[in-house]
Structure formats: C-alpha cells, structure tokens
Amino acid sequence: MSLKAQSRFELRTATRDEYETAVKWAEEEGWNPGLADLEAFFAADPSGFLMGFADGKPVSSISVVRYGDYYGFLGFYIVHPDGRGKGYGMATWMAGMDYLANRTVGLDGVVAQQNNYKKSGFQLVGRNIRFSGVPRLSATAAPSVNIVEAQLEHASQIENLDRACFGAPRPGFLRAWVFATPDAGRKTFSAFEGDGLSGYATIRKCIEGYKIGPLFARNKQSAEALFQACCADAEPGAIITLDVPEANRQAMIMAERAGLAPVFETARMYRGSAPDLPWSNIFGVTTFELG
C-alpha cells in the first residue's frame, strides 16, 4: 500500500527519549514492558531503533538490533492505530530489513502474523510460551547450588554462558542489563556449582508485576534455584512472568509447578540460518523485543 500523498512521512533512527513513545504503544498493546528497559536496549545498538513520523508525529516503530557481525533481532514492530492502513508499517519494515541487510535475523512474532513473516523469508523454529501468575515459593533448594547476586567478577562467565544460549555476543547489553543501577528495577542472580557458573537470571519490574529473563542454566537444579531466588526478591503476591521456549519441557514443568499458567505465545522465527541453540539450557528468554 502506498503512503498517503498528503502526509510527509519520515523514517529515522530514534533517540532514547523518542522511543519512550514506542514503549508506551507496547504497553497499550498489552506487552507489559519493563519500567526501565531502554537504557540496556540502547546499549545493545543505539542505531537499531527506528521510528516513522507522519507530518512530524510518531506513527510507527521497529527495533532492529545488531549483534556481532552476522546476527540481528527484530522487535517493537508497531504502527499506532491512527496510522494503520496507510503504508507506514510496510515502509518501516523495509527500512528495518535494510538496516539488518544480509544478517541472520530472529524475531518473536505474534502467531497471527506468522504467514506475513514467512512472505519475508522467515521460518518457524518453535514457540515461546508466556507463563504468568503469583508463584508458589519452594522451601527447599538443591544443596549443591549456591545462589548469589551477580558481581562484576562474574561478568566473563556470564558472557560465555549467554553467548552460547543467545547465539551471538552482546557484551554492551549484558553489562547494562545485568549490572544495573538500583533505580533500574532489575536484579541479577548467579548460580554456582563448585567453582563454576551454572546459570544466571534477571528479574525486573514491569508495568504489571515482574518478568524473569533471561533464565539460562546448565541444568534443572540451577534453573529452579535461580527462579526461586528471583521470585523471592519480588514483592509478596506480585505477578511473575516467564517466557519459556516450548522446546524446553523441563522449563514448562517448572513454571507449571510454581503455579504459573500460560497466557500468551509467540512464534520464534528466523530469516537465514537459525543459530543452533541449546534449548535445554534456555529456561526463559531475555525479552520478546531483543531476543
């Protein structure tokens, strides 16, 4: 669909302040974003957040974050209801795809849009199931697992585990996400078995309740200990959300046993060669926006 002739449409890289508008749209769409996500998001790739403006008014958004030399992730693909049906969405999509060029591109899309993504060369690899609810806390933990708040001295081990589970390096994002200031509303825990890191998880405040993500662990007992530590750090009675790859059956069982229920799902899709991810170690994805 062509752009309306009477509207002057401009697509450009957005500033962090401008992109607060896209976060507000995401809230209105029911995506429940974190209260202080953008600092870490922009640390991943400050040029990867595009917005479309019609006659100077924001009408569309997309995030197309580059990781390393070969990978990118697409999210925040939103057209404001006032701008739909006017060609702004397709123009925004094409600009995002141009920015990511020949990279492998991942996305977590709503199920209803799978066919449209397939037309752009994306292939389905599996589903992510959003579990949400007030969790039941366990009184016991595996004695072999030691849970501590993440420290800078853990950074290299966290980065190594994260790269394996995410599929690409993202050191800038991780430093901002994991080692956040207290006002960011995020806390990260590290799990150790023996002298080695066996997992890590971040919990953050959102518009409604909290989200845990990522939750990466080398085994079930470390994942469960991290999950319980995150839940215990939240306000009593708060709703906790965990986005679980359907391919990790142990993670699905963990969420269900804790009293969380499936409320939403996305389609994990890739254009290009999908990374070979260790799904059994991915108990919770980081975010649907940035992968």
Image (cartoon, rainbow, N blue to C red):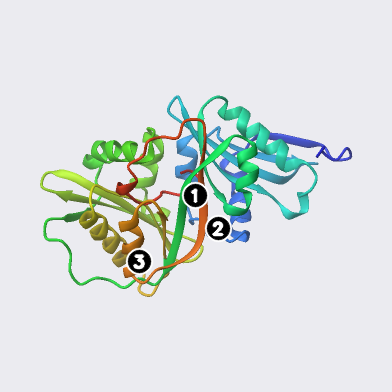
In the displayed structure, 211 sits above or below 126; it is: below
Residue drawn at 51 percent across, 57 percent down? 265
Give left or right: position of 227 versus 172.
Answer: left
Disc number for residue 288: 1
The answer for how far apart the CA atoms under marks 2 and 3 are is 20 Å
Q: Residues within 10 Å of mark 2 (few under 14, many from 20)?
A: some
The answer for how far apart the CA atoms under marks 1 and 3 are is 21 Å
Which residue has dot 3 on it? 234
Which kind of residue does numbered mark 3 sit on? Ala
From the image, which quarter does the N terminus lie in? top right
Residue drawn at 22 percent across, 54 percent down? 222
User: Under tag 1, what secondary structure?
Assistant: loop
Q: Residues within 10 Å of mark 3 (few under 14, many from 20)?
A: some
Which residue has dot 2 on it? 31
- The number of callouts visible is 3
User: Under tag 3, what secondary structure?
Assistant: loop
Circle 2 or circle 3, nearest the eye: 2
Do the CB atoms of the residues marked 1 and 3 lie less than 8 Å apart?
Answer: no
